[in-house]
Amino acid sequence: MDHPQRWLALAHAPGLHAGQLQEWLAQGAQPEDLLRQSRPTLAALGLGRAATGALLQPDAAAIATDLAWLEGSPQRSLVCWGTPDYPPLLARIPDAPLVLYVEGDVGALSLPQLAIVGSRNPTGPGRDTAQQFARHLAQAGFTITSGLALGIDAAAHCGALQANARTVAVVGRGLDAVYPHENSGLAREIVARGGACVTDLPIGTPPLKQNFPRRNRILSGLAVGTLVVEAALQSGSLITARLAAEHGREVFAIPGSIHNPLVRGCHRLLRQGARLVETVDDIFSEIAPIISEMRRNATEKAHSKPVSGGPRLDKEYEILLDALGFDTAGLDTLVVRTGLQAGAIASMLLILELDGRVQQQPGGRFSRRLPGKV
């Protein structure tokens, strides 16, 4: 990135997002070109007074703070709208962030993700359920995405880590500190294990209440679907679920006892059309079409190139299928045979399974599916 200061100036413009600039960008302009525009031009784009003022007079001190944070570790980066690293599913939401602050592997943001959210004060069984679902979904190849909060969020992240898989934490404050503090160790482990912490909030932004709905639209926008495990009627998880539905993503909910107030939000979602979930297979059956679309339309990093006459696999997929052969093989064996990372193989196997090219066998092993077999 040649001029991160320009993008950081955009990040400090209150309320500014990619959806406001669609017509202007369609004319060939770049987002950072906003910094060279006059007040009347910015007003004609429909930008608010606060955003206009921030673009005309960028906050040099705040930008310097962001730059100092970026330079503090090679694991820190900016992901800007319209660049190859920007997650393709997030780019589809109407108010997509122009800038993402990321600590960890930016590639994790473009992997097939399933969001798991719920109560900050769950029951013991609810916490166990979130952790078990996260672990099984991660073993199947999903990157688990959640909000790093106490309760269900933390359980979901931990379940993914137990599966030796990557997980993404979308947070409601700047990345200079962790909120809540109790999850500081978990945040460090997420990054160390190949995942990422991400926000669109500048460095130094505190965890204010109004930041969390803004966080939730990123959480739901990154994922192919959102699973709500336990949620009361006033839970912020219902905001994430509503946004997921508005983004055209699947919403899943786990039912519970009518005597448990922490599942009333889940029951409301089910009455509104959410998919009832009892096993991970209930999720797989619904998201298969979305994953197939991701495979068809993904960039090179998502390992897919559509051609006429059917999908053609790229080199890494061919290597994986050759290594699999027509015998069964486990993940560890495939890592040795291909030299690819376990997380990448798990995601590729998920896409190949949903595409009908491989099938999972007992004991977590996989085999190729013979042509014409179901």
Image (spheres, grey):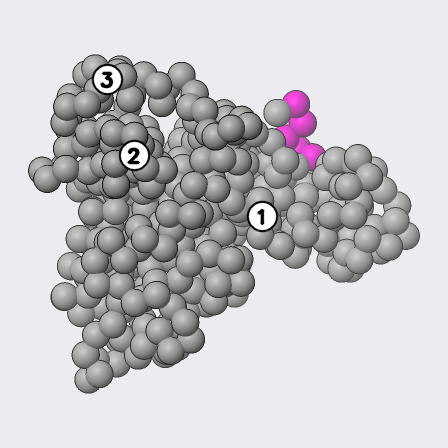
Which residue type carries mark 2?
Answer: Gly
Which residue is pictured at 36% across the width and 37% down the height? 355
Where's residue 173, x and y in %?
46, 52
Which range is magenta?
Answer: 2-6
**Residue under label 2:** 372
Which label was assigned to residue 92?
1
Which residue type carries mark 1?
Answer: Arg
The answer to whether residue 297 is left or right of residue 10 is left
The answer to whether residue 226 is left or right of residue 280 is right
Q: Indicate the quadrant containing the N terminus: top left, top right, bottom left or bottom right.
A: top right
Which residue is pictured at 53% across the width and 57% down the height? 247
Q: Which is the main secondary structure of the residues drawn in magenta?
A: helix
| Viewer-closest of 137 and 282 | 282
Where's residue 263, x and y in %?
27, 75
Where's residue 162, x and y in %?
17, 42
Number of the front mark, 2 or 1: 2
Classify mark 2: helix, strand or loop: loop
Which residue is pictured at 32% across the width and 46% down the height? 144
The answer to whether residue 71 is left or right of residue 52 is left
Number of the front mark, 2 or 3: 2
Q: Label 2 to label 3, Cα distance in Å? A: 21 Å
Classify mark 1: helix, strand or loop: helix
**Residue under label 3:** 323
Dot placed on the residue nearer the N-terminal end, 1 or 3: 1
